[in-house]
Amino acid sequence: MNIKDQVVLVTGASRGLGAEIAKAFGREGARVILNYYQSEEKAKEVVEKIGSEAIAIQADVLDRDQVENMFEKAESHFNHPVTTIVNNALVNFKFDSVNRKDAKKIDWEDYQVQLEGSIKAALHTTQVAYEGMATLQFGRIINIGTNLVQDPVVPYHDYNTSKAALIGFTRNMASDLGANGITVNMVSGGLLRVTDASSPTPPEVFDLIKEDTLLKQVTTPEELADTVLFFASRWSRVVTGQNLVVDGGQVMN
């Protein structure tokens, strides 16, 4: 199925990376659902930029009932099941290397928040979408991760660990859903310049990252969004269970 024929849900799409992913799909002609939790005005601004083939729907992706209601609204609006999911929503986290909790201060509750934000949210969207995707014998699930799993240069213990768990989730779902024509992959960026979440990062950290990449540049949200499109395109139709690091060559697998 070409991207222009897909119905794409992007979670956490009102700003930052999520907004750029939604706009990238919009440019390719897809029908796009922008999920947001609180930022209604910003979500509607993104919808206006995409045009008539986009809709914004509020839902807390940690709440199964709200996710089911979101899918019902989306499928009713477009008269078609959701074919493609980008699990991008970030729950209560800032990339603040100065004020982060170190090994002595991190609490189990901090881990729980990020594990639920990564795994519980992705589980909800995957399970709710499954029936429609299986009926179509087509589905694309793309999870957003981080290169900090491979190289925790800043040990954000809760966030990094939750994204490591998301790799396991991605591979297990890929194994279980592949027979139904559903691929499950992961795109892992480095620190992006600049999103709301990365805005607390000091400029000197961005400078260090730039010098540490092979391309001598810090990846932007727009550049990462283009790679997400790859996993939804026909070019990746037999690729599943993979984690692609997109960071200008800072981390090489």
Image (tube, helix red, strand yellow):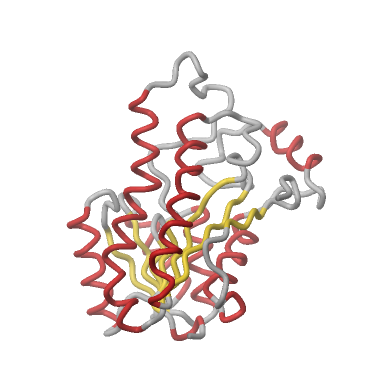
Across and down, in percent, residue 165 comes to 45, 44
Side of 203 relative to 163 (left or right): right
Across and down, in percent, residue 23 comes to 51, 69
Identified at 50% across, 54% down, the residue is 144
Residue 21 drawn above or below residue 30: above
Identified at 22% across, 79% down, the residue is 76
Side of 34 relative to 21 (left or right): left
Identified at 62% across, 79% down, the residue is 235
Identified at 32% across, 77% down, the residue is 134
Side of 16 relative to 169 (left or right): right
Res 128 quadrant in image: bottom left
- Front residue of 95/177: it is 177
Across and down, in percent, residue 244 comes to 62, 57
Labels in figure, total: 0
Res 71 quadrant in image: bottom left
Side of 241 relative to 150 (left or right): left
Across and down, in percent, residue 218 comes to 71, 48
- Front residue of 185/87: it is 185
Res 70 quadrant in image: bottom left
